[in-house]
Image: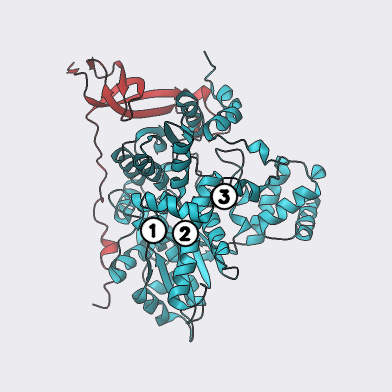
Chain colours: A cyan, B red
Amino acid sequence: MRDMSYAAVMARKNEIMKASMGMDYNDFIQSPIAFDYERMMRETGYGLEDIVRIQTETKVGHTPLYELTRLTEEVRKFAGTGKGATILVKDEAANASGSFKARRASISAFEARKKGYKGLAAATSGNYGAAVASQAAMRGLKCIILQEVFDSRGIGQPEIVEKSRACEAYGAEVQRLSVGPELFYQLLMTLENTGFFNASLYTPFGIKGVETLGVEVAEQVRQRYGKNPEAVVITHAGGGNLTGTARGLLAAGCDKTRVVACSVDLGGLHMASDTDFNRKSFTTGHTGFGVPFATWPDRVDVPRNAARSLRYMDEYQLVTQGEVFYVTELLTKLEGLERGPAGNTSLTAAVTLARQMDRDQVVVVQETEYTGAGKHHNRQLSFARENGIEVRVGDPKDNVPGKAIVIPERLEQVRGKVQDMDKLRLSYLKNAAKAHPVEQWTEGDYAFLAADLKKDVAWVKSAIAGIEKN
Amino acid sequence: MTKVAKGTWVEIERILLKPEERAPNLPEETRKCSYVLRISGFLQADAEIGAEVTVKSLIGHEHKGVLKVVNPSYGHSFGTTVPELLTIGSEGK
Ligand SMILES: Cc1ncc(COP(=O)(O)O)c(C=O)c1O
């Protein structure tokens, strides 16, 4: 009998990963920090055209890009003279399973089928589960989704309960788990016992699948406006949405486009806390994932993460829960679109950006997601009230995560807040120093770190010297 | 106790890790709880609620656990109306 204790299963991590993906990360790893990222992405063997073809087979991609004329008009009412960029939204809810995550699951499902796996498994509490289940269904594969759903009272976060339903609707086995990071332990055991393919969110297959989103944005904007978009806003949690989209934009020649990350500010709430679990009104696209993943991507269920957001990010906006709910309602009432929380997170930041940008510029919100029972903002607000959180109308600056959700009175009050990018980069470097002592860093490590932080080697050297001194 | 018939769609629960077996570095409030799995499937033999049973999931895999719910259903909804949302966006009408 194999030892199934927590420590024993975690110790078998590398061999389980290798068997469940048919790839060996040791081929790319250069040091405890550095690895050959671009070669890893290339050696998936899938070029953009292959990906488009594979995705078209399973109802992914070619989603519409809409101009939000009425919302743009509203922003122009208070933006300064000459300000008020046009806001566009890419309706990713039109993908099979209702979000951009279908792009991310599509190549894994294809690869698993090609390599002869009987099924796919993934640990995810979000849209990705439904995406994997839906893609697996179309490829005739079995699917197991592991989700963190309920707290010790047995109460499920309504949005995740909806995700359980969606996965079962697509024929997947859903393992619903209580709060805790041991989701990964259960995934490893499941992969080991079933021999299924590891459809992790963070493999090169997952990220390559999202590149088509960036390419489509570039092509659609060019076709309609005769230029590249000035800014693209991307809801950020684990960083795959941003990484894939930005890589696609670059592949399509948009090297001047500003890549803006956005997360809902959940500062102060602990992600592994049983009691904080149901005090969050967002299950993704928030700082609880966004900040740790940006500042140390290699904390995931594969040996090296293909989602590396600081490589591509120019700016990072934070918005409050109340601001997103307000803008969600406006999207419905002004634009006739009922859409879900994660996409509307970047839409909220787009309001702030459009206000600062020139009138002849365009800002693209690169996704929407579906909404419905459990996911709907009315349910999240009523659930917050049931959990003792104050919900009121007022100034969004009084919003306190886990305590008070303040819904703005007017669009003008939606202001968001920028994060200090260099602070994030320094925090990344501190994590790198924990992973591998600075004295042992080679020129190769410095070059990798510089690329990972969108800076040069000189910057990294002086930044780490500053950290070491303090 | 009522018998639940073989073949019924049910939900089972199983403790995967007891508090002392859990991952290191958990917050206090999480560490004191067991790590629990719930899963639905078709009951493999007649049994009573609370008994140790085996179910077969939607993909035909077998799982063991304590029988908890008969015909588990999704009760999530749009929630009770939040009046603060109703007036947003209709100001100019
Ligand atoms: C619809 C949607 N948008 C955005 C995100 C954030 O993406 P990422 O985790 O890749 O940053 C997620 C997933 O978590 C999502 O489901």
Q: Are marks 2 and 1 in contact (CB under 8 Å)?
A: yes
**Circle 3: residue type:** Ala
The image shows residue A141 at horizontal and vertical percentages of: 38, 35
Which quadrant holds residue B4? top left
Q: Which residue is mark 1?
A: A92
The image shows residue B62 at horizontal and vertical percentages of: 35, 21
Residue shown at the point (80%, 50%) measured from the top left = A443
Please determine whether, in this image, residue A340 is positioned above or below residue A330.
above
Residue shown at the point (32%, 44%) measured from the top left = A162
**Considering only order in the chain, which callout, 1 or 2, is on the residue closer to the N terminus?**
1
Q: Quick one: A369 or A160, which is closer to the camera?
A: A369
Query: Which element type, helix, strand or loop, lies under badge 3?
Result: loop
Mark identifier at residue A213: 2
State left or right for residue A458 relative to residue A82: right
Chain ID at mark 2: A
**Considering only order in the chain, which callout, 3 or 2, is on the residue closer to the N terminus?**
2
Q: Quick one: A171 or A424, which is closer to the camera?
A: A171
What's the CA distance linking mark 2 and mark 3? 15 Å
Q: CB of residue at label 3: within 8 Å of ligand 1?
A: yes
**Circle 2: residue type:** Leu
State left or right for residue A301 relative to residue A193: right
Which quadrant holds residue A251? bottom right
Task: Work out whether disc 2 and disc 1 sit on a shared chain.
Answer: yes
